[in-house]
Amino acid sequence: LVQITGVDAKKKRLYIAALDLVNGTPVYDIKPVVPWDIPGHFDGEKLEVPSWVSQDDALSMVNFAKEAESNLETLIKYKKL
């Protein structure tokens, strides 16, 4: 989550703060706000989101490429992860 500090529609720029990035790092993945990502959203406040936003996106399984799985196992073995 980030803080939006400004929008310049003419230059197509979104100004943000409170984001953990290296200065000058591009941001490629801007997503809409979804209620389950907001701290305290279960406290009774109502947040309206677009109808296409749903919370049923939980992954039941993740498949890794063999090389990625091997790398993960090595990291776990040597307590690097």
Image (cartoon, rainbow, N blue to C red):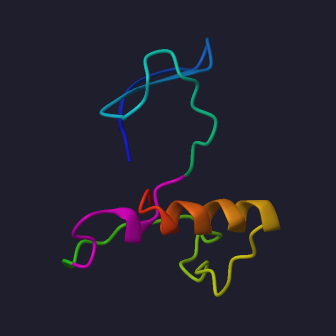
Is 26 placed left or right of 67 in the picture?
Answer: left
Q: What secondary structure is the magenta-colored segment mainly?
A: loop
Q: Which residue is drawn at 64% across and 35% down?
A: 28
Q: In which quarter of the image is residue 10?
A: top right
Is 44 placed left or right of 61 in the picture?
Answer: left
**Residue 80: image x %, image y %?**
44, 56
Q: Which residue is drawn at 61% across and 71% down?
A: 51
Q: Return the residue nearer the eye: 43 or 21.
A: 21
Q: Give the range drawn in magenta.
A: 32-42
Is 27 placed left or right of 18 in the picture?
Answer: right
Instruction: Tally the numbered discs.
Output: 0
Q: Return the residue nearer the eye: 43 or 56.
A: 56
**Residue 21: image x %, image y %?**
42, 29
* Residue found at the far top of this picture: 11
Asked if residue 38 is among those painted magenta in the image, a careful observer would answer yes
Q: Quadrant of residue 17?
A: top left
Q: Which residue is drawn at 61% across and 12% down?
A: 11
**Residue 16: image x %, image y %?**
40, 28
Q: Return the residue nearer the eye: 74 or 24.
A: 74
Asked if residue 60 is among those painted magenta in the image, a careful observer would answer no
The C terminus is located in which quarter?
Answer: bottom left
* Residue found at the far front of this picture: 78
